[in-house]
Image (cartoon, rainbow, N blue to C red):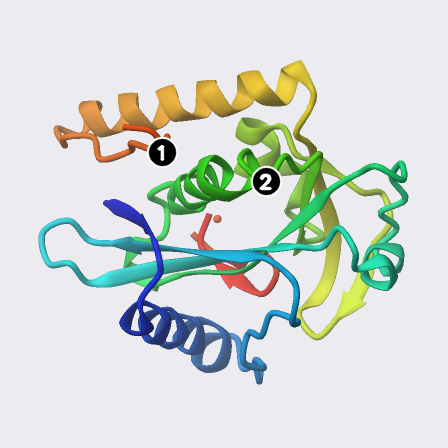
Amino acid sequence: MIIEMATSKEDMLSMSRIRRQVFEYEMGLTLPALSVPEGLDAAHVIARAELTGEPVAALTVVDTTNEVDLCEQYGLCLDPDARTARYTQLAVSKPYRGMNLPLMLILKAHYHFVAPGKFTHTWLLFDAERAANSSLCARLGFSVSERVFHSQFGITRILVRDERSAFCEQAIWQTQQYLVAVAQKNGHSSHYDYYPLNHDHLNLDAGGGR
């Protein structure tokens, strides 16, 4: 897989097509167009199949630091200096699920948006029944809320990551090493260069793939 930051109009159209297939055709949801309120920062990540260049997965991360009402709605009662970012509308095309794409996309977003933006916490909605056993909790150090929320995506819980904790920092590094090892085991070259310098089911904030 090739994981890239989405920057062009073509990239955004490809991400919209992936989301439409997952959310509307598979889940039967009417998904509103993803819009970022004026004044907020956001970043978009796209995954492509290495051999064909076909877009197969999408993820957006949005700065929610000043979205007080939204954070309170989901019980994100953090300290006044907290900077929060939300992962949203993760979608993975059906043939490419079970390939750790959510982990890859989040790592890319972490290194290119979350870390440079000095966010203290990241969060997302996740299917309530599977949240505690998700790869995001097991690999990336997200913690799951006890409270459940009813939304247009069904019954969900909040996954939250404390970006400042040593445990979560270590989880990022270990996940990257895990993905490299998986790629090598499968006989693929690794394109998991996440650093800016150099679920098989529908889930995640109305997203697909794990």
Q: Residues within 10 Å of mark 1 (few under 14, many from 20)?
A: some
Q: Position of residue 170 (x, y in %)?
A: 55, 16
Q: Position of residue 34 (x, y in %)?
A: 55, 74
Identify whether 17 is placed above or below 207.
below
Q: Position of residue 119 (x, y in %)?
A: 66, 38
Front residue of 126 and 52: 52
Marks 2 and 1, how far apart at CA: 16 Å
Identify whether 83 is placed above or below 56.
above
Type of amino acid at the residue the image marks with label 2: Gly
Which residue is rendered at x = 87% and y = 63% of the image?
69
The residue singled out by tag 2 in the image is 117
Mark 2: secondary structure: loop
Mark 1: secondary structure: loop
Q: Nearer the viewer, mark 2 or mark 1?
A: 2
Q: Which mark is residue 205?
A: none
Q: Quadrant of residue 194?
A: top left
Front residue of 7 and 14: 7
Identify whether 97 is placed above or below 21.
above
The residue singled out by tag 1 in the image is 194
Q: Earlier in the sequence, mark 2 or mark 1?
A: 2
Type of amino acid at the residue the image marks with label 1: Tyr
Front residue of 32 and 183: 32
Q: Among all residues in the image, which is located at the extreme front?
A: 39
Which residue is rendered at x = 44% and y = 54% of the image?
209
Q: Position of residue 149 (x, y in %)?
A: 82, 60
Q: Quadrant of residue 188?
A: top left
Left/right of residue 59 with respect to residue 1 in the rendered view: right
